[in-house]
Amino acid sequence: MSPLRITSLVLLGIALAGCSALPMRDGAISGPFYTPTNVTGVARIPAEIRRVIVLPVWGGPQITAETLVALDTVCQAELNRTAKFEVVPLSRQAFYNLTGQRQISSVEKLPAVLLEKLLSLNNPYGADAVLFIDVTTYSPYTPLTLGLRTKLARTSNSEIIWAADNLFPSAEPAVANSARLHAERFGTDRGRTNLSHPILQNPERYAGYVAAATFATLPPR
């Protein structure tokens, strides 16, 4: 083998070794990131919408009561973080006491007795608007997937102020990147290494990201 060929092979080996030593590109820093797009609403939240009652999360019969209660807590926490309005959660037991039902979806009509309570300013549940939160897709196993459909409606005339309906599959790199970024901004996670991140393996924490990304699309004040 000629000296020139030997030298070329040595240089190639050094170059490949250098490439393998380079740090992995971290999507939580550079993206791409996911932005929910299936959103509609008014330009700004009306000034008179100050108090919003949040109904229990609807998940249909396929989601356990324990999971729904956990989702209630997660969604309420992320909604409070937006500071868009006063959040008044309606507990599952209170909802049942009022309506005889455990949950209601955004595509159903509000029971008359509940609507009457919502319109009563002297009632502790009196509010300017009501927020529906529906789970449309839920997979608690890796890769996690969660779909949320939300509607914010006036209690006076049922006008839809804001609505969103999006799917968040963690198998999609942009969604995974956004979830990790959320965890690093608002959680206690440290160390950007790869996409095998705790939030992508924990359904409750992942739901926190999905709720935050959904409520980030609320109209401004």
Image (cartoon, rainbow, N blue to C red):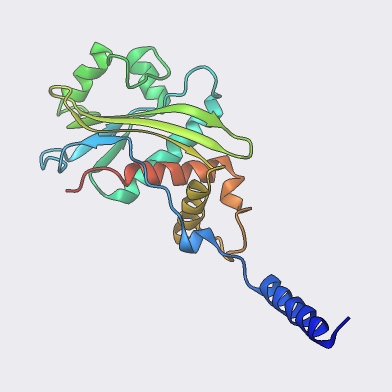
Residue 62 horizontal/vertical position (percent):
55, 20
- Please identify the quarter of the rendering in which residue 20 is found: bottom right
- In this rendered view, identify the residue nearer to me: 95 or 147: 147
Point 48% across, 63% down: residue: 29
Residue 77 horizontal/vertical position (percent):
39, 45
What is the tally of numbered marks visible in this picture?
0
Give the residue at the far bottom of this rendering.
3
Q: Is residue 74 left or right of residue 111?
A: right
Is any atom of residue 124 visible in this view?
Answer: no
Is any atom of residue 189 visible in this view?
Answer: yes
Look at the picture and state if 145 lies above or below 136. below
Residue 23 horizontal/vertical position (percent):
62, 71
Quadrant location of the N terminus in the rendered image? bottom right
Q: Is residue 39 left or right of residue 24?
A: left
- In this rendered view, identify the residue nearer to me: 111 or 212: 212
Look at the picture and state if 34 lies above or below 144. below
Point 14% across, 29% down: residue: 121
Point 44% across, 42% down: residue: 210
- In this rendered view, identify the residue nearer to me: 130 or 6: 6
- In this rendered view, identify the residue nearer to me: 89 or 207: 207
